[in-house]
């Protein structure tokens, strides 16, 4: 199974249990010319999720209209259990961004 298909299977396994959980979202700019500062933490509830038709992005919805789109095809997506939350880490190598989303109560 190629990495992108494995990622999609893992997302379908992990994300249903995380709906209605609180998300802490950090997006870090990894570009060489990026401003050196700490990214702001965005806290929202996960209302729903979907993978785009082209399977390029994962959309994490805060409400029926607002979402954050996370690229899933051009960098790894890793889930891990840390203390009392589940961490999802994704990288967008093309856009030079790192995404860290923690799901908790």
Image (spheres, grey):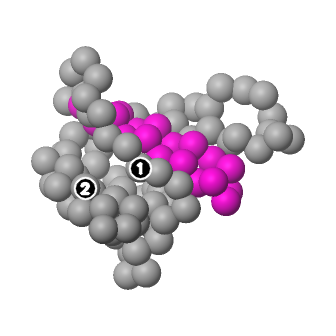
Numbered range of the magenta stretch: 87-104
Q: Identify the disc placed on residue 39.
A: none
Q: Main secondary structure of the magenta part?
A: strand
Examine the rendering and report whether any part of residue 65 can be seen: no
Q: Tell me if mark 2 has few (under 14), some (14-19) or many (20+) residues whose alpha carbon lies within 10 angstroms of its own.
A: some
* Looking at the image, residue 34 lies above or below residue 11: above
Q: Considering only vertical position in the picture, is 63 above or below 41?
A: below
Q: In this rendering, would 94 be left or right of 73?
A: right
Q: Position of residue 2 (x, y in %)?
A: 37, 67
Position above or below: 90 against 83: below
Please give the residue where the numbered disc 2 appears in the rendered image.
10
Q: Name the foreground residue: 42 vs 6.
A: 6
Q: Quadrant of residue 40?
A: top right
Q: Secondary structure at mark 2?
A: helix
Q: Residue at x 68, y 50 (%)?
A: 96
Residue in the image at 57% along x and 43% along y: 98
- Mark positioned earlier in the residue sequence (1 or 2): 2
Give the alpha-carbon distance from disc 1 to disc 2, as whole Å. 9 Å
Q: Which element carries disc 1, helix, strand or loop?
A: strand
Mark 1 and mark 2 residues within 8 Å of each other at the beta carbon:
yes
- Where residue 36 appears, x then y in whole percent? 78, 28
Query: Where does label 1 land, which residue?
Result: 77
Q: Quadrant of residue 7?
A: bottom left
Name above or below for residue 26 compared with residue 90.
above
Q: Mark 1 packing: few (<14 Cα in 10 Å), some, or many (20+)? A: many
Looking at the rendering, in which quadrant would you find the N terminus?
bottom left
Can the viewer see residue 15? yes
Tell whether 13 sits left or right of 74.
left
């Amino acid at each position: 199974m190629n990495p992108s298909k494995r990622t999609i299977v893992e997302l379908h396994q992990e994300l249903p249990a995380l709906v209605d959980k609180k998300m802490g979202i950090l997006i870090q700019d990894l570009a060489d010319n990026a401003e050196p500062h700490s990214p702001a933490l965005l806290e929202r509830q996960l209302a729903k999720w979907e993978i785009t038709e082209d399977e390029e992005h994962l959309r994490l919805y805060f409400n029926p209209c607002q979402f954050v789109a996370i690229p899933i095809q051009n960098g790894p997506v890793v889930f891990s259990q840390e203390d009392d939350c589940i961490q999802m880490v994704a990288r967008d190598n093309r856009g030079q961004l790192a995404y860290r989303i923690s799901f908790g109560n």
